[in-house]
Image: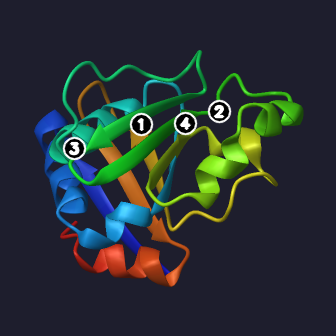
């Protein structure tokens, strides 16, 4: 569908992209997947996005809990980390189907661990570490909503 390529020279560049995403009304019901190796910057991007959306308090990675709910003004957000997800029965037991059926922003790290259970992403963001500070990112829209979101990104 539609692609944006960008290079983040430092964490401020990551935060700038997060602010651009947060400024878009379409984000309220989007599903964004984050791809990349350990340490690529997936959780860092999510933290900047949540802060830009107005989430207060501590933002922790859902690595062990699989999902962390967040509240921002007028917005429900669920941050998934499927890194340790390995039992499809957990999908039903944890109520993830209901979460994905409800309105709100869903962000998922390691989505490949839940293939066949999660819906198609509106935007898939692949992050690659160039060195300790720089990152290369590709934002790939897979749906009309995702294309609309990318229209507001100056990458």
Q: Give the CA distance from mark 2 to mark 3.
A: 22 Å
- Residue 105 place in picture, x, y as percent: 42, 54
Residue occupying the point 17% across, 34% down: 11
Residue occupying the point 78% across, 38% down: 91
**Is residue 120 positioned above or below 39 on the image?**
below
Query: In screen coordinates, is 82 left or right of 71?
Result: right
Which badge, 1 or 3, is on the more N-terminal residue? Answer: 3
Q: Secondary structure at mark 2?
A: loop
Task: Say which residue label 2 marks.
Answer: 82
Q: Give the CA distance from mark 2 to mark 4.
A: 6 Å
Mark 2: few, some, or many residues within 10 Å (few <14, many ≥20)?
A: many
Q: For the residues labelled 2 and 3, say whether their Cβ atoms are less than 8 Å apart.
A: no
Task: Say which residue label 1 marks.
Answer: 42
35 or 92: nearer the viewer: 92
Q: Colour mode? A: rainbow
70 or 63: nearer the viewer: 70
Task: Say which residue label 4 marks.
Answer: 80
The disc placed on residue 14 is 3
125 or 63: nearer the viewer: 63
Q: Give the CA distance from mark 4 to mark 3.
A: 19 Å
Q: Give the CA distance from mark 2 to mark 1.
A: 12 Å
Mark 3: few, some, or many residues within 10 Å (few <14, many ≥20)?
A: many
Mark 1: few, some, or many residues within 10 Å (few <14, many ≥20)?
A: many
Q: Secondary structure at mark 1?
A: helix
> Of discs 4 and 3, which sits in the foreground?
4
The disc placed on residue 147 is none
> Of discs 2 and 3, which sits in the foreground?
2
Residue occupying the point 44% across, 74% down: 146
Q: Give the CA distance from mark 1 to mark 3.
A: 10 Å
Residue occupying the point 51% across, 68% down: 122
Which badge, 2 or 1, is on the more N-terminal residue? Answer: 1
Q: For the residues labelled 2 and 4, say whether their Cβ atoms are less than 8 Å apart.
A: yes
């Amino acid at each position: 569908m539609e692609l944006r390529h960008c290079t983040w020279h430092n964490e401020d560049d990551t935060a700038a992209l997060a602010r651009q995403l947060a400024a878009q009304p379409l984000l309220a019901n989007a599903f964004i997947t984050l791809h990349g190796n350990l340490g690529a910057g997936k959780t860092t991007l999510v933290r900047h996005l949540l802060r830009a959306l107005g989430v207060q308090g501590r933002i922790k990675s859902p690595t062990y809990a699989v999902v962390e709910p967040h509240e921002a003004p007028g917005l429900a957000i669920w941050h998934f980390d499927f890194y340790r997800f390995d039992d499809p029965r957990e999908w039903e037991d944890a109520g993830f189907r209901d979460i994905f059926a409800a309105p709100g922003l869903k962000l998922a790290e390691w989505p490949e661990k839940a293939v066949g259970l999660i819906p198609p992403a509106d935007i898939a963001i692949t992050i690659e570490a160039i060195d300790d500070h720089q990152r290369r990112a590709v934002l790939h829209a897979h749906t009309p909503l995702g294309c609309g979101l990318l229209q507001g990104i100056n990458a």
